[in-house]
């Protein structure tokens, strides 16, 4: 029998034995959610929702909600809530006896399969393309499988909470305690324009004050609220930015393309525009004593370490980020 067939057979066995024979009340649906059954078994063995949560890689409220759902499906109370922990009901004892063996066998088989599981990685599009994927090329050549998603921090972190990503590179630390994160690197932001604009600004009467001279230069950004440029003005020039964007584009790659073509100026991360600065296609308009920095965080989904390739990707990124 193939590994896939064995997995399917074990899942079917877990479903068919999930409802104790000879009991009254609702029965579990024919295709009961295995995640609910796993949560039930973890709580049954741990003796409390709180103790089971880290074993499952879930938050305590999620464990509580899943047990409540399973109780609604069975029409039976599974646990008696105590001041400290829970006490399984007779129905729960019988259910645990029925499902423990097939679920344990399925878990063992899935763990052996985890060796070949793809690593689900997510982060900002530009950073993934310029820094992250090049750093991971040796791992891909060594057999590591990657499934890469790009997006904004909050949607990606919410998807991670739902189990969709193993690792997320975020431009801000995740809120709450459910997701653990470590600082990965500091991204430096630079004020840049094409050489033609830089030459025009050099002859300006207020050339020593870029904040003033740039009022006459079109601004290119990726959002109407100018988040990166406003922050630069506030932290470097100590004033609020009052200008409006001349060009708004969908992402930082498009900002880079427009500025490189001579559309105006912008503020870009060094990782994205360093090659253009080195080749002379872009010019640095200002060199502050302390350039604005934004810390990147590497976030790992609880339980993702069961896949050893997740650890390999995580460690490789942390080593590579030292030179970013």
Image: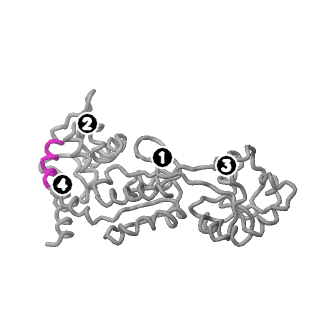
Q: Residue 121, percent across and down? A: 42, 61
Discs 3/2, front: 3
Q: Which residues are magenta?
A: 92-101
Residue 225 seen in render: no
Give residue 231's mark: 3
Q: Looking at the image, is mark 4 or mark 3 earlier in the sequence?
A: 4
How many C-alpha atoms fall within 10 Å of the one at disc 4: few (<14), some, or many (≥20)? many
Tell me the quarter of the picture where residue 202 sits.
bottom right
* Count of numbered circles in the view: 4
Q: Looking at the image, is mark 2 or mark 4 earlier in the sequence?
A: 2
Give residue 48's mark: 2
Q: Quadrant of the N terminus?
A: bottom left
Q: CA distance from mark 1 to mark 2?
A: 27 Å
Is 34 on the left-hand or right-hand side of 93? Answer: right
Discs 4/1, front: 1
Magenta run includes residue 151:
no
As displayed, is residue 263 above or below residue 59? below
């Amino acid at each position: 029998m193939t590994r896939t067939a064995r997995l399917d057979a074990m899942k079917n066995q877990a479903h068919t034995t999930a409802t104790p024979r000879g009991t009254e009340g609702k029965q579990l649906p024919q295709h009961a959610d295995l995640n609910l059954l796993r949560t039930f078994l973890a709580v049954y063995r741990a003796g409390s929702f709180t103790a089971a949560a880290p074993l499952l890689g879930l938050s305590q409220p999620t464990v509580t909600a899943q047990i409540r759902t399973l109780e609604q499906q069975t029409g039976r109370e599974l646990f008696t809530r105590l001041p400290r922990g829970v006490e399984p009901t007779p129905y729960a004892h019988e259910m645990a006896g029925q499902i423990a063996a097939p679920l344990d066998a399925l878990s063992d088989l899935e763990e052996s399969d985890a060796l070949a599981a793809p690593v689900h990685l997510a982060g900002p599009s530009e950073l993934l393309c310029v820094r992250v994927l090049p750093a991971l090329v040796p791992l891909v050549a060594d057999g590591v499988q990657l499934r890469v998603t790009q997006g904004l921090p909050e949607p990606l972190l919410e998807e991670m909470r739902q189990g969709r990503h193993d690792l997320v590179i975020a431009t801000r630390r995740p809120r709450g305690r459910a997701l653990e994160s470590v600082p990965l690197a500091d991204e430096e932001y630079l004020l840049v324009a094409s050489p033609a604009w830089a030459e025009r600004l050099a002859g300006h009467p207020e050339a020593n004050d870029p904040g003033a001279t740039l009022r006459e230069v079109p601004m290119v950004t990726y959002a109407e609220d100018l988040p990166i440029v406003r922050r630069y003005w506030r932290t470097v020039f100590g004033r609020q930015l009052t200008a409006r964007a001349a060009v708004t584009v969908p992402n930082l790659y498009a900002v880079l393309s427009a500025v490189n073509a001579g559309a105006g100026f912008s503020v870009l991360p060094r990782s994205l525009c360093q090659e253009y600065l080195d080749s002379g296609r872009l010019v640095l308009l200002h060199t502050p004593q302390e350039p604005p920095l934004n810390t990147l965080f590497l976030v790992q989904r609880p339980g993702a370490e069961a896949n050893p390739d997740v650890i390999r990707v995580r460690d490789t990124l942390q080593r590579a980020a030292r030179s970013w």
